[in-house]
Image (cartoon, helix red, strand yellow):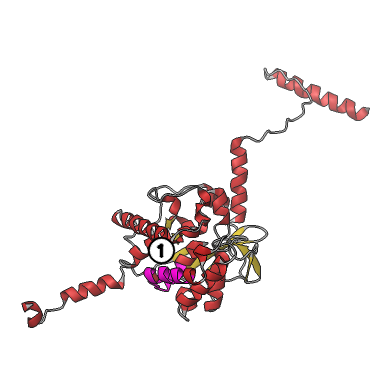
Amino acid sequence: MQHSLQVQQRLQSSAQASSRRGAPVRVRAQAVPRRTPDATSTSSSQARKNARNTVANFQNAEATTLTLPSQVQLSEPSSAAKTKATTLSWAGAGIFFFWQLGALKFLAERYDLTRVPMAGASGGALAAVLACCGIPADVVLQRAYDLSVQHGIWERPLGLVGVWGSLIEQWLDDLLPDDAAERCRGKITIIVTTLPNMGQVGISDFADKKDLINCAMASAHIPMLLDLKFARLCRGKYCVDGSFPDFFYNDNSELLKAGGSAVIFDYFQDTNLVRKGRMDMLSLKQYEEVKHIMQVGYEYARTLHHEGHFDHFEVGEMVFDHLEEAAKPRAPEQAAA
């Protein structure tokens, strides 16, 4: 009772002091209302969630996972501050990997892709590995066709379901050279999605060809579709498709964006590519359709080339060879001909 009287006297004296300053005071106990989440706070919360799940690139599975600061993801750099494009990134693609293969073919005719830093997720990881190892696009396509015919893919009631994974793994093993890991180490980043936290992790250090293929297969692992298993074990962790979060958030990861320094090959950006809904990426295509998809990708890369997107990449050795050949003095009999 005495304590309550003291509090009341303090409040009254405070009110009198404020009244002397010309500001009437009313003392009232008032409950603070709960804040109702609005669209802005919800999106900010989602952005913070994304920031926690996207991790910085590391060189091996034992390295510490570093969460990117949220401001890196939420703030878009000004056009003046944007870095020149020096990286090729290949987004998740499914069957539209062959669109990326067409783009790869155009670029390989003009640039030395074995010297260009690359990142890839899902089917894009396969593109990055093949490009870094210098495998010709036409050879890649032909081997895919041969395996499809050999395993009767177009005659199977379920098409690629349950067997797609083993076909891709055999296809990579057939195409890649024995020193593929040495060629790709430190040059490409393969993105996987780890379980159960759904964190996207970039791997750039490969022990050998088998390890490289396993990382690529983990990146391309669409749950259940490839081998009727939900996840693939990679370096002691269960992983799923490296573009899995990107598909649901409808945006490419920071690992693919490479701090704004990447040209990203994402088939969603090509208005000339006809698709039948978002899940069309998982549907089996006839061989003629595949070749058409590849040609569309080739033309897309040609457009980007003419717009100057690749001006800072290494010029291909093929171009230098042509220049040197043209500069050689012609023999008299050749000149007469």
What amino acid does circle 1 point to?
Answer: Leu
Whether residue 305 is situated above or below residue 217 in the rendered picture: above
Q: How many marks?
A: 1
- Describe residue 145's horizontal placement relative to residue 13 as left or right: left
Was residue 246 drawn as part of the magenta stretch in this picture?
no
Q: Nearer the viewer, residue 113 or 144?
A: 144
Tell me where residue 144 appears, x and y as whole percent.
45, 69
Tell me where residue 81 appears, x and y as whole percent.
40, 51
Residue 121 appearing in the image: no
Whether residue 45 is situated above or below residue 103 in the rendered picture: above
Q: Nearer the viewer, residue 308 or 160?
A: 160
Mark 1, secondary structure of its residue: helix
Whether residue 336 is situated above or below residue 216 in the rendered picture: below
State the image quarter where residue 131 is shown. bottom left
- The residue at 56%/67% (across/down) is 165
By secondary structure, the bulk of the magenta-drawn segment is best described as helix
Q: Quadrant of the N terminus?
A: top right
Q: Nearer the viewer, residue 232 or 79?
A: 232
Tell me where residue 198 appears, x and y as whole percent.
63, 57
- The residue at 74%/30% (across/down) is 32
Tell me where residue 142 appears, x and y as whole percent.
41, 70
Residue 147 appearing in the image: yes
Q: Which residue is mark 1?
A: 101
- The residue at 51%/68% (across/down) is 152
- Describe residue 175's horizontal placement relative to residue 138 as left or right: right
Work out which residue is located at the far right of the displayed protein and give it. Answer: 1
State the image quarter where residue 210 is shown. bottom right
Q: Quadrant of the C terminus?
A: bottom left
State the image quarter where residue 143 is shown. bottom left
- The residue at 51%/49% (across/down) is 278
Q: Which residues are magenta?
A: 128-147
